[in-house]
Structures are given as structure tokens and as C-alpha cells.
């Protein structure tokens, strides 16, 4: 059996794996973005919140490697598998349409030609995050893993912005906004898939009706201006947090900063 055919056969399972791994990683992503936003309040607030969050995802190696990094890795692999599966199905559909038409015609359109731009943006933000996540993890966790340097905090990030401003400001801004959009859109989009993983009821009719309501709710949220306003607002606060870490916003000096 071809790889594409095998992936198509197991598409539902792959989508479930993708959804659950993404939902798991989104918990860490929420911590990460919230911490960045707290940079607006200054170094002390940022570092104190980071200490609180790290108790849950960093000091326990199983959680850090198994849950956080593991869910990210599984999400990336399952997503790439589904990308391959979609391309395979698109080629199959296009080939079938050509066979049905004996007269020369333009290249037939398939479902991939009608994907909403919001979903396309979600996919491309995922490609971007997948491309740079390894470097980001090594840069932020590498000092502790390889050199036992544990103080990767506000000052560490501020120094990177100070040394390479033309690289690091666009990098942090793009990484943060892509993460917020991909995480929020993906989480809402996967609501019916996450629900379908559980057997809340054995009655098939009740299950189908519940799924229909969830699909309608999902589509409503994904077409809501309020939802995208929320994404914009969180992203904007995150960007302001990045500016604060680069000392581009002025705060009243605290004892922590003076020290």
C-alpha cells in the first residue's frame, strides 16, 4: 500500500493525534505568551511569573521532555503527515477528473483551491513555527542543558534584543504572533475532533446531533470578528511585552532593576 493511501486510511486517527497534541502544547503556549505580556510590567513581574510557570513545565523533566516537547514533536509530525495526505488526495482527485474529460481542459480545481485564507494563514504560521522551534528551544533551554546556566530570564532576553535588534525584534514579533494565531485558530478548529475522541453517549443520533452543534459553533467562532479581535489584542500585548524586554518602553526603576 502506498504511503498516501495508508495515511488516507488512517486520516481520522491522524487528525485526532494532531488535535490532542496541539491542545496539549497550547497549554504551554498560553503560559509562554502570558509571560511575555507580563514583560510590560517590568523585569520583576516577568521573572516572578516565569518562576511560577516553570514549576509546572520545566523543573519536572518528564513534563518538559515528554509533555511539552513531546506534544510539539508529535504535532509537527502528524501535521506533516496530513500535509502529505492532502497532497496525495488532491493528486488523486485531479487525476480522476482528467480521466473523466476526454477533451483538453484547463487544470481542474480541487478542494485545495477553495481553502479560506484564514485557514491558509493557520497552515503557513504552523510551517513557520515548525521551521524555527528547534532553534528557539536550543537558544532558550540550551544554556541550562549544556552549560548549567539557569538564569535565562528577562535580562537574558533583553540582552539578545540589545545585541541584535534588527534580527531579534522581528524574530520575537513574528514568532509570537504566529504562535498566538496558530494556537487559537487550531484549538477552535479542532473542537469537534477533540469531542469525537470521547464516547460521551452510546446513542448514535445524540452523538451526531452534538457533533453538528459543535461544528456550527466552531464555524461561528472562526467567522467571528470578535475572535480575530481577541487574537489581535493578545498579539499586540505580546509585541508590547517584547518592546518592554528590549527596554523600548520606559518604566520606573525598581529595586530589582537597580540591583
Image (cartoon, rainbow, N blue to C red):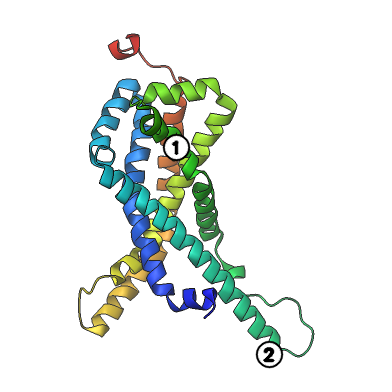
> Position of 153 compared to 90: left or right?
left
Residue 244 visible somewhere in the drawing? no
Say which residue appears at 79% left-offset and 84% top-offset: 104
2 vs 1, front mark: 1
Outermost residue to the top:
258
- Asked if labels 1 and 2 touch by Cβ distance under 8 angstroms, the answer is no
Q: In this view, does 254 lie above or below 10?
A: above
For label 2, the SS is helix
Residue 60: quadrant of the picture: top left
> Position of 73 compared to 166: left or right?
left
Outermost residue to the right:
104
First of labels 2, 1 by sequence position? 2
Residue 36: quadrant of the picture: top left
Place of residue 101 in the rendered image (x, y in percent of width and height, measured from the top left):
72, 89
* Residue highlighted by disc 1: 138
Estimate how packed mark 2 is, as few (under 14), some (14 to 19) or many (20 or more) residues with alpha carbons within 10 Å.
few
Residue 2: quadrant of the picture: bottom right
Q: Is residue 109 above or below residue 76?
A: below
Say which residue appears at 49% left-offset and 35% top-offset: 172
Outermost residue to the front:
146
For label 1, the SS is helix
Residue 135 visible somewhere in the drawing? yes
Say which residue appears at 45% left-offset and 19% top-offset: 247
Q: In this view, does 248 lie above or below 29?
A: above
Numbered badge on residue 180: none
Distance between the alpha carbons at the discs numbered 2 and 1? 52 Å
Mark count = 2
Placement of the C terminus among the 4 image quadrants? top left
* Residue highlighted by disc 2: 100
Place of residue 51 in the rendered image (x, y in percent of width and height, measured from the top left):
26, 30
Could you say which is closer to the camera, residue 88 or residue 215? 88
Place of residue 34 in the rendered image (x, y in percent of width and height, measured from the top left):
34, 37
Amino acid at each position: 500500500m502506498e504511503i498516501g493511501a495508508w495515511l488516507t486510511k488512517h486520516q481520522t486517527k491522524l487528525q485526532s493525534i494532531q488535535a490532542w497534541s496541539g491542545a496539549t502544547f497550547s497549554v504551554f503556549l498560553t503560559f509562554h505568551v502570558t509571560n511575555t505580556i507580563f514583560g510590560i510590567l517590568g523585569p520583576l513581574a516577568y521573572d516572578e511569573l516565569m518562576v511560577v510557570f516553570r514549576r509546572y513545565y520545566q523543573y519536572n523533566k518528564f513534563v518538559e521532555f515528554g509533555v511539552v516537547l513531546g506534544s510539539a514533536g508529535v504535532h509537527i509530525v502528524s501535521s506533516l503527515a496530513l500535509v502529505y495526505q492532502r497532497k496525495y488526495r488532491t493528486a488523486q482527485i485531479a487525476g480522476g477528473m482528467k480521466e473523466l474529460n476526454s477533451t483538453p481542459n484547463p487544470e481542474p480545481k480541487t478542494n485545495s483551491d477553495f481553502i479560506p485564507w484564514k485557514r491558509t494563514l493557520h497552515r503557513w504560521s504552523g510551517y513557520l513555527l515548525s521551521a524555527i522551534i528547534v532553534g528557539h528551544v536550543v537558544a532558550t533551554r540550551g544554556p541550562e542543558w549544556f552549560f548549567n546556566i539557569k538564569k535565562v530570564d528577562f535580562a537574558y532576553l533583553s540582552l539578545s534584543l540589545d545585541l541584535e535588534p534588527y534580527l531579534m525584534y522581528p524574530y520575537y514579533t513574528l514568532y509570537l504572533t504566529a504562535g498566538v494565531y496558530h494556537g487559537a485558530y487550531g484549538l477552535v478548529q479542532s473542537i469537534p475532533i477533540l469531542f469525537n475522541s470521547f464516547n460521551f453517549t452510546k446513542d448514535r443520533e445524540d452523538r451526531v446531533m452534538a457533533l453538528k452543534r459543535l461544528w456550527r459553533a466552531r464555524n461561528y467562532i472562526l467567522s467571528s470578528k470578535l475572535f480575530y479581535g481577541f487574537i489581535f489584542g493578545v498579539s499586540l500585548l505580546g509585541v508590547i511585552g517584547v518592546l518592554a524586554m528590549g527596554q523600548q518602553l520606559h518604566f520606573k526603576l525598581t529595586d530589582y532593576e537597580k540591583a
